[in-house]
Amino acid sequence: MIDDDVRADVRAAEDLAGSTPIDGGALNGVAWTGDADRVVWLHPAWQTVEILPEHVRDALRIGRLDLVAVAFACRATGTWRPLLAGVNAWCYGGSEHGVERTRRVLALADLETRLEAAVAVLDADGPVEAYYLLSNEGHVHGWGPALFTRFLDAADRRESGRALGLDPALAGAVNGLVPGSDLAAADWGTAEYAFYLGLLHRVAAEAGVSPTSVEAALAAKFAD
């Protein structure tokens, strides 16, 4: 459970996300109907990660729809390691180093327990609580926010207030949208994630599109 001081910061961040001015020009030319699947090509070394779906290993490509399908299968089996592997493949893509890092995380003795706990909190209390858990006592060694927010995004079943992935490009998008915002490129606090979620859900409501579409469109516009 989020401690009282952090919860106060989260509430303030959520309030700010709902009222802060947005630079309208930053959204000029954004295509809300872009590629929400965001397919990534993989390094051949990912073929050796047998926990990945066979079609992903054969084609050496993975998209967000693949992650959602893996998450659905994980809910059926109660085992979440395959989703972690899929998320890491999607995030690391063509990096051979990412394969080795993923192997080390998958080998952690208490990994499944920590993943199950995170999903239970996500389902019961929402993505901000789950983010706090994975950033603190439920942290998985070697697995940072740019990875575990993508895990939460794929695993989340809710329609309203759902999780979204946050990575350096999307942090840069927030800085481009909100005058004076200065999100770092990594290691965001829980209140910063709450602000990010609130802002993207607000933009989605104002644009009449899904939060996932907003995330994909901003990732495309603000990509390095």
Image (tube, helix red, strand yellow):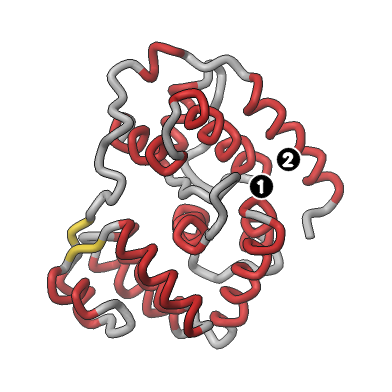
Height in image: 113 above or below 159?
below
Which residue is disc 2 drawn over?
10
Residue 160, horizontal then vertical, whole percent: 58, 45
Residue 139, horizontal then vertical, whole percent: 62, 67
**Residue at 62% in and 56% down:** 131
**Residue at 43% in and 69% down:** 71
Front residue (pair 137, 25): 25
The quarter of the image holding the N terminus is bottom right
**Residue at 31% in and 45% down:** 36
23 to the left or right of 19: left
Front residue (pair 77, 144): 77
Height in image: 223 above or below 154?
above
Which residue is disc 1 drawn over?
190
C-alpha gap between disc 1 and disc 2: 7 Å
Is residue 117 in sight in this rendering? yes
Badge 1 amino acid: Thr
Please count the marks in the image. 2
The circle drawn on residue 159 is none
Badge 2 amino acid: Val
Circle 2 SS class = helix
Front residue (pair 217, 98): 217
Is the C-beta separation of discs 1 and 2 under 8 Å?
Answer: yes
The quarter of the image holding the C terminus is top left
Q: Residue furthest bottom?
A: 109
Q: Earlier in the sequence, mark 1 or mark 2?
A: 2
Residue 104, horizontal then vertical, whole percent: 42, 79
**Residue at 45% in and 56% down:** 150
